Amino acid sequence: MKTIENLQNLIVVMQETQHITSAISLLSWDQECYMPKGGGRARATQLSYLKGLEHESRTGRKMQTSLSECVDLETGTLLTPASEWDERAQALLRETWRDYYHATRLPSDFVRTLGLETSLAHQVWIDARKQNNFSLFAPNLKRIVALKKQEADYLGYTDSPYDALMDEYEPGMTVAHITPLFEALKSKLLPLVAKIGQSGVSADDELFRKFYDPQRQWDFGLKVLSVMHFDLENGRQDHSVHPFTASFHPTDVRLTTRVDPHDFLSSLFSSIHEGGHGLYEQGLSQEYYGTPLGTAISLGIHESQSRLWENSVGRSRAFWTYFFPKLCAVFPENLKGIDFETCYRAINGVRPSLIRVESDEVTYNLHIMLRFEIERMIIEDDLPVEDLPDIWNEKMEAYLGIRPETNADGVLQDVHWSGGAFGYFPTYTLGNLYAAQFFNQAEKEVTGLSEKISAGDLLPLKTWLNEKIHRWGRQYSSQDLLARVCGEALNPSYFTNYLETKFGELYQV
Ligand code: ZN
């Protein structure tokens, strides 16, 4: 009996912490969506105070006392035999201890220094990118790299310091595991990109770059979200400069998107992408709100949900069989005389490009390979920061056959390094690989999935994802969940087969 009481006390402490986290998240969401410009300084002070409270709540005496009644704080060993806990409780204690242990590894001086360095670097990065001047950013980046190496030492690792950093975003994933997967992927992607380039088939890039009425774009995006069964009673969509998803509770999930009057596909697919993230958040357990069992597993699994909806569903023939007539009805003047095939091709155009976030399904992961390889050189091999622009450009040429003319379009394009987010990029590709493997499994288990999508019935797929993935929170690791759902370890051939079939047909290669 005592053990159950101890666990319930611990859950209460975690939920109190979560209230602070949710408040921080709401203030940050508001900052991106509605806050007047003048509120910036006050908001920064408010957020910094609340983050201090949050950290104290996660690691302070109340948490220590409650957790120490269930596990040994130094080792994570359960104080009562595992047989006294059910599987849910064991996972909850394992993950809670993991979070506590991680949060207490880094000395608070170190956290403050890193926080200060990254907030300074963010502004310098913005200026450096604007002025196309890498050497302006290099000194900041050098300091951040040194701090991240120190962080890896604090966190600990067996083989590579990069493992310690990646573990923050994709727990349990290592360089040794990921490298052969990425090599296998690259060996399929490079020839496919080359064949598509030589195919002589081209998509109409301009079709969706004309003026599309912003209000009608917005309404169409909401229509798609409602067909996906994103619950607008327990969530909403707002405008922001960079699309993102924030969640304060499974009953209050906020999506944001950007509407560009001259780039309809960018608006639409960011709504669908964020909608996939949002469905995951709405599908998490309410009972375990604030605990690891009510939290998403990893960035890679989160991204698998957004990519599955964006690409496996949103860029499929089946999806457009349902939505093409609706799109024509909403934008009759834009799509007059355009047939289904032209529209489908325009949605699925493949073309090597300089900017990762604008790239297509086929070339996207080559942008990630390049970043993963460079990050390893920085963290593992002490590659000097000054060498980054040249290495970046050489790899772009080798993988995509194009060379950036400016560093703004090359090594300076992403925000991640200025924030110290080394080890983050691989989760994008992992998300694509997981998504293809999950979707393949859904096709086996949901009867007539493709016909259902063609008929606009997306509920069976959403329910399947709720059952198989969302409701478990962090009960399983990403690799264990994948094995449970698909009966097999992570296998990149589901993704490469999907690309070869889809784009083989489209480009006749
Ligand atoms: Zn995403």
Image (cartoon, grey):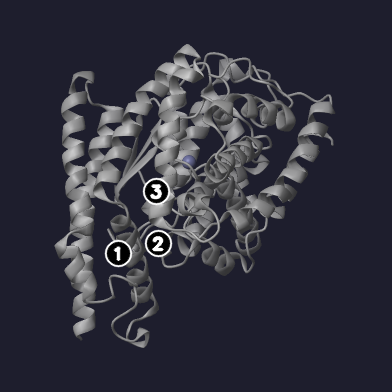
State yes or no: discs 2 and 3 in contact (Cβ < 8 Å).
no
The residues tagged by marks 2 and 1 sit, at their Cα atoms, a distance apart of 9 Å
The residues tagged by marks 1 and 3 sit, at their Cα atoms, a distance apart of 30 Å
Percent across and percent down for residue 9 are 18, 71
Dot 2 crowding, Cα within 10 Å, few <14, some 14–19, many 20+: many
Q: Quadrant of residue 99?
A: bottom left
In this view, 305 is above or below 115: below
Secondary structure found at label 2? loop
Q: Quadrant of residue 89?
A: bottom left
| Marks 2 and 1, the one that precedes in the sequence | 1
For the residue pair 478 and 80, the one nearer the viewer reads as 80
Percent across and percent down for residue 194 are 80, 32
State yes or no: discs 2 and 1 in contact (Cβ < 8 Å).
yes
Q: Mark 2 points at which residue?
A: 473
The label number, if any, that marks residue 288 in the structure image: 1
Percent across and percent down for residue 117 are 33, 33
Q: Name the residue under label 3.
A: 151
| Marks 1 and 3, the one that precedes in the sequence | 3
Amino acid at dot 1: Tyr
Q: Quadrant location of the N terminus? A: bottom left
Q: Nearer the viewer, mark 1 or mark 3?
A: 3
